[in-house]
Image (spheres, grey):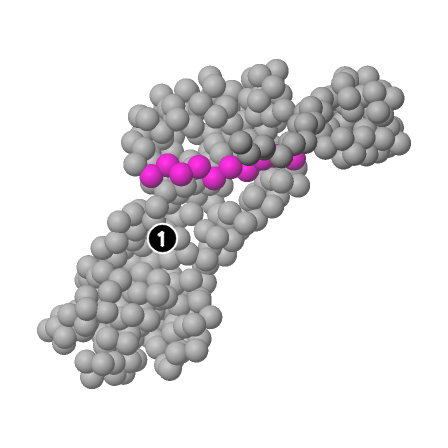
């Protein structure tokens, strides 16, 4: 009968008491140092001894135990949903995550696809986050926000095109994008403007307010706005291009740069000159759009906040009783190139 090789004995998990003995301090001091407690003054030399002892032993504080004592974790929950996002959202999440880590928060992106507005707050609350930044794709009700607060969330924040009553809001008003794009086309003398409405799931949250902004910009000039359903597929773009001249349009705001490039190629393949017959404008200012011929006109979008996003979240966490705040994050500007 074969013998199993001798297995090394598993080392016991180090505890805060082990760290305290090695560093020559109390367990309370270990807790204060490793939890970065701002309420207790501890010398830098003591802090260094505690951290060195924890590193030597491989000790990591127990997050669950800490959350039981505090009633919440140091977790900021970022629920995610399955819809395409652009460069601006990637910059937003990168800036927010890196800043929150600097402030000793744990950032968790939590897949929330398929959750309805009633179930989502309960599922999020089970994790005991100290803050939740909820996407606009899952409408947050006052009851849901109250449930999150009762579970220990100090700040409940929504991120989307419109603020939500009763909670803090980070607003990216997509109407500004549509208004800016159409404003550029109006300056170039265009008055019969198509607006691409993506048929992909989840994008209506952004496309509908962009259409609203386009209409608001066009109305004082008597310009015509024509919604144009389009899938992000070559076949869909080719079908739209084939009937383009029957639409009697002299310009198009194509939702974003990716849709603009797709449609512009289809229009050119159909023999429609860009920009002589039809001007094309996108949004996002992607590098690839500058490499096209003609170069793509676009709307550049930037984050605009009075203070870093992480500092804003931290302030809301530290002052949980303050009135709901609304912060407009979006700054837009037209970039006119050869396609318009």
Q: Quadrant of residue 227?
A: bottom left
Residue at (60% x, 39% y) in the render: 100
Residue at (26% x, 54% y) in the render: 200
**Where is 132 relative to 294, above or below?**
above
**Where is 225 relative to 164, above or below?**
below
Please provide percent x and percent y for residue 131.
Answer: 52, 30
Please provide percent x and percent y for residue 274.
Answer: 28, 80
Q: Secondary structure at mark 1?
A: loop
Q: In the displayed image of the protein, which residue is found farthest to the front?
A: 1
Q: Is residue 257 visible?
A: yes
> Image check: 100 left or right of 138?
right
Tell whether position 112 is magenta.
yes
**Where is 290 relative to 78, above or below?**
below
Q: Is residue 223 visible?
A: no
Q: In the displayed image of the protein, which residue is found farthest to the left?
A: 246
> Image check: 86 left or right of 106?
left
Tell whether position 111 is magenta.
yes
- Please tell me whether the stretch drawn in magenta is mainly helix, strand or loop: strand
> Image check: 334 left or right of 1?
left
> Image check: 109 left or right of 38?
left
Q: Quadrant of the C terminus?
A: bottom left
- The crowd level at tag 1 (other Cα within 10 Å; few <14, some 14-19, many 20+) is few
Between residue 328 and residue 160, name the one nearer to us: 160
Q: Which residue is mark 1?
A: 84
**Where is 1 relative to 207, above or below?**
above
Please provide percent x and percent y for residue 39.
Answer: 75, 22
Q: Quadrant of residue 18?
A: top right
Magenta stretch?
104-113
Q: Quadrant of residue 290?
A: bottom left
Residue at (43% x, 28% y) in the render: 124
Between residue 272 and residue 41, name the one nearer to us: 41
Residue at (19% x, 80% y) in the render: 270
């Amino acid at each position: 009968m074969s013998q199993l090789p001798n297995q090394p004995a598993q080392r016991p998990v180090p505890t805060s008491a082990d760290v305290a003995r090695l560093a020559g301090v109390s367990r309370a001091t270990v807790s204060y140092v490793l939890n970065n407690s701002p309420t207790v003054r501890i010398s830098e030399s003591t802090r260094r001894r505690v951290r060195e002892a924890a590193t030597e032993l491989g000790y990591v504080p127990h997050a669950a135990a800490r959350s039981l004592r505090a009633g919440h974790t140091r977790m900021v929950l970022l629920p995610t949903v399955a819809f395409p996002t652009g460069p601006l959202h990637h910059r937003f999440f990168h800036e927010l995550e890196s800043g929150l880590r600097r402030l000793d928060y744990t950032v968790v992106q939590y897949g929330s696809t398929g959750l309805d507005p009633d179930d989502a707050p309960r599922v999020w609350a089970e994790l005991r986050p100290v803050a939740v930044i909820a996407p606009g794709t899952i409408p947050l009700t006052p009851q849901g926000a109250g449930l999150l607060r009762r579970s220990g969330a100090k700040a409940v924040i929504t991120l989307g095109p419109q603020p939500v009553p009763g909670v803090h809001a980070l607003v990216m008003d997509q109407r500004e994008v549509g208004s800016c794009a159409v404003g550029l086309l109006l300056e170039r003398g265009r008055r019969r403007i198509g607006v691409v409405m993506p048929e992909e799931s989840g994008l209506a949250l952004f496309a509908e307010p962009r259409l609203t902004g386009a209409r608001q910009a066009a109305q004082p000039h008597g310009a015509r706005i024509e919604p144009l359903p389009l899938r992000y597929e070559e076949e869909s773009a080719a079908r739209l291009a084939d009937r383009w001249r029957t639409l009697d349009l002299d310009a198009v705001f194509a939702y974003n740069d990716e849709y603009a490039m797709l449609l512009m190629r289809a229009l050119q393949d159909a023999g429609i000159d860009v920009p002589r017959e039809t001007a094309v404008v996108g949004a996002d200012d992607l590098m690839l759009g500058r490499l096209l011929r003609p170069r793509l006109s676009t709307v550049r979008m930037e984050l605009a906040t009075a203070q870093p996003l992480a500092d804003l979240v931290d302030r809301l966490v530290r002052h949980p009783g303050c009135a709901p705040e609304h912060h407009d994050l979006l700054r837009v500007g037209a970039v006119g190139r050869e396609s318009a």
